Image (cartoon, helix red, strand yellow):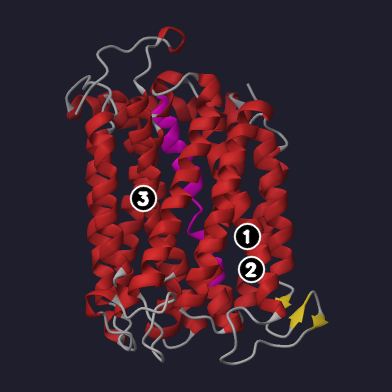
């Protein structure tokens, strides 16, 4: 691993070469298949429709597991960020939590259809992988200010998110085109028999997404470890722990005086919970509403990821020119309106207007309601990337530069301290009403509240 020899002020910093920046960007490419394949478009809907007793129960169980992971992340993220700032290192933390991501993802292979006995270990592995993915991202984000000048942070963040979306698209194409087949026809989306003799009947093409995600992460995160510089170690771990906790206590005490930063962290807490829940349950919701299976949901995921790629790239440019606050606000408005419209889409109606339902065995997305869901999903994808990318550049603009990992820990804390609330509410309301639509409706409140709090933030 290379290191930055000395820490100097941002104004006088010598930034690393282009290869180091490109290697850092590939972290998003490496990590994205976990969110694309496992938590959103392939494994989550497969779990809800083929492992759980029914889609509503599957949605609630998945929500409870994600809530448990969110609570663990919320409790530990600011502490670990403070320790990382005090110790000076980022890469060892990324390696440790990346290992959790790899182990948890590989365990998805055990998810055989109709086997209720594997639900507890499967959901435990899901929570473990989610913790690993989130914490690895915290420390990767904290490297951003060392890579490019402040005026290029927005473009770097947006490019990273866009690259991640492209990685998600490629991984989805691999799964749908060559690995996951329709159990009835035995063929993939591209008309091939599954590679490696994967059995469509036992859904091995869906289950292979776990090991594929793990292998993908290991391969594509390696350039970051080889070529992207890290801070040198400042002090031993025990001393760093003591100093890190002291600085965290000081930061929390100072936070009420930093009104814009406090308002932003609170807004991020609320709207991130809504966004993560929307992405996490979008595929499950479509599976229950339209009866979509892996090929339909995966194709939808490819379209959404393409929209997200362009959205994140454009959002990065707008971030540098207009500022992250405007990008965040615009993205939230699009998400809010799209979510409200989705709640008015059913199998045989769009915005309360009756339409012909999809024809069984007909062409892909033949129903008008399905096509409406596709359009709205693409709008959500196009807005979700800029929202997340601009949020981390906003944090960099507002936070003290010498405690950036600590504040990224607080950023992750606010993104996760209530992250169990969204999935938990969705799970509870869905379980109580036996209605997926009622469970998803709660997310409207998150975006409205987040947008209101964002208006109180003043950009530096």
Please say if 403 is above or below 44: above
Circle number at residue 137: none
Dot 1, how many residues are within 10 Å of its Cα: few (below 14), some (14-19), or many (20+)? Answer: many
Q: Hey, which residue is sitting farthest right in the picture?
A: 353
The residues tagged by marks 2 and 1 sit, at their Cα atoms, a distance apart of 6 Å
**SS at mark 3?**
helix
**SS at mark 1?**
helix
Q: Which residue is mark 3?
A: 31
Please say if 321 is above or below 15: below
- Please, what is the dominant secondary structure of the magenta stretch? helix
Circle number at residue 374: 2
Quarter of the image where one finds residue 341 = bottom right
Residue 32 x %, y %: 40, 53
- Is residue 82 visible in this depiction of the protein? yes
Q: Hey, which residue is sitting farthest top in the picture?
A: 12
Residue pictured at 60% horizontal, 78% vertical: 436
Residue 435 x %, y %: 61, 81
Task: Name the foreground residue: 51 vs 266.
Answer: 51
Is residue 412 found inside the magenta-colored segment of the image? yes
Asked whether, in this view, residue 154 is left or right of residue 160, the answer is: right
- Is residue 76 visible in this depiction of the protein? no
Q: Which residue is mark 1?
A: 378
């Amino acid at each position: 691993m290379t290191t930055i020899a000395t820490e100097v002020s941002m104004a006088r910093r010598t930034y690393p070469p282009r290869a180091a920046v490109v290697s850092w960007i590939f972290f998003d490419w490496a990590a994205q298949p976990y969110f694309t394949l496992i938590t959103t478009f392939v494994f989550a809907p497969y779990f809800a429709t083929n492992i759980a007793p029914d889609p509503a129960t599957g949605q609630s169980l998945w929500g409870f597991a994600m809530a448990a992971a969110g609570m663990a992340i919320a409790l530990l993220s600011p502490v670990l960020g403070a320790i990382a700032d005090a110790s000076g290192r980022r890469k060892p933390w990324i390696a440790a939590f990346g290992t959790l991501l790899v182990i948890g993802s590989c365990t998805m292979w055990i998810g055989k259809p109709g086997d209720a006995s594997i639900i507890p270990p499967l959901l435990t592995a899901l929570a473990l992988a989610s913790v690993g993915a989130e914490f690895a991202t915290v420390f990767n984000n904290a490297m951003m200010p060392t890579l490019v000048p402040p005026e290029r942070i927005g473009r770097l963040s947006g490019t990273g998110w866009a690259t991640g979306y492209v990685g998600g698209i490629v991984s989805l194409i691999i799964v749908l085109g060559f690995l996951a087949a329709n159990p009835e026809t035995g063929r993939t989306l591209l008309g091939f028999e599954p590679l490696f003799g994967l059995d469509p009947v036992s859904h091995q093409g869906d289950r292979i997404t776990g090991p594929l995600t793990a292998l993908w992460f290991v391969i594509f995160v390696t350039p970051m470890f080889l070529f992207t510089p890290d801070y040198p170690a400042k002090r031993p771990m025990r001393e760093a722990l003591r100093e890190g906790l002291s600085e965290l206590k000081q930061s929390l005490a100072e936070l009420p005086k930093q009104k814009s930063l406090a308002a932003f962290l609170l807004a991020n807490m609320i709207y991130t919970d809504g966004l993560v829940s929307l992405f996490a349950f979008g595929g499950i919701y479509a599976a229950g509403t339209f009866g979509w299976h892996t090929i339909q949901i995966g194709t939808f995921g490819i379209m959404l990821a393409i929209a997200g790629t362009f959205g994140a790239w454009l959002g990065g440019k707008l971030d540098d020119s207009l500022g992250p606050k405007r990008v965040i606000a615009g993205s939230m408005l699009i998400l809010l309106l799209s979510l409200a419209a989705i709640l008015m889409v059913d199998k045989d109606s769009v915005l309360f207007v009756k339409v012909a339902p999809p024809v069984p065995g007909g062409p892909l997305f033949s129903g008008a309601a399905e096509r409406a869901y596709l359009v709205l999903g693409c709008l959500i994808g196009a807005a979700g990337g800029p929202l997340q990318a601009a949020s981390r550049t906003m944090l960099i603009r507002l936070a003290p530069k010498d405690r950036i990992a600590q504040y990224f820990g607080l950023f992750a804390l606010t993104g996760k301290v209530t992250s169990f609330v969204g999935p938990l509410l969705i799970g509870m309301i869905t379980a109580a009403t036996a209605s997926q639509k009622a469970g998803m409706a709660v997310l409207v409140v998150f975006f409205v509240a987040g947008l209101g709090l964002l208006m109180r933030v003043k950009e530096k």
